[in-house]
Image (tube, rainbow, N blue to C red):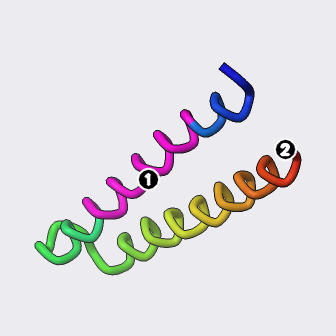
Amino acid sequence: MSRQEYIDKYLSKFISRKLIVFVIGSVALFTGNLTGDNWVVVSTAYISIEGFTSIITEVYKSRN
């Protein structure tokens, strides 16, 4: 397995896990199990990590 394939495999698993956490947080917000302040923390973390992984992905694409 090449380095790029290895990175893609594990980044895609990480990204999908983040999305699941974001969706669960949103459902919890709308069902009243999570406060608005806590949801802001979850959504900010999701957006920050998503941006970071996008940057890393682009860096590795430009190197190859």
Residue 43 x, y percent position in the rendering: 44, 71
Identify the main secondary structure in magenta: helix
User: Quadrant where the N terminus lies?
Assistant: top right
Q: Mark 1 is on which residue type?
A: Lys
Residue 48 placement: quadrant: bottom right
Let me know if residue 19 is in the magenta part: yes
The foreground one among 46 and 35 is 46
Above or below, 7 against 56 in this view is above
In the image, residue 29 above or below residue 2: below
Q: What residue range appears in magenta?
A: 9-24
The residue that mark 2 highlights is: 64
Secondary structure under badge 2? loop
Label 1, label 2: how many angstroms apart (C-alpha)? 26 Å
- The residue singled out by tag 1 in the image is 18
Left or right of 38? Residue 57 is right
- The spot of residue 57 in percent (x, y) is 70, 52
Q: Residue at x 60, y 39 (%)?
A: 8
Residue 39: x %, y % from top left: 36, 72
Q: Residue at x 74, y 53 (%)?
A: 56
Residue appearing at x 38%, y 78% in the figure: 37
Q: Does residue 41 appear to the left or right of 25 in the view shown? A: right
Q: Specify whether residue 63 is painted magenta.
A: no
Q: Amino acid at mark 2?
A: Asn
Q: Residues within 10 Å of mark 1 (few under 14, many from 20)?
A: some
Is 10 on the left-hand or right-hand side of 56?
A: left
Q: Secondary structure at mark 1?
A: helix
Q: Which tag, 1 or 2, sits closer to the chain's start?
A: 1
Asked if 26 appears above or below 7 in the picture, the reply is: below
Q: How many marks?
A: 2
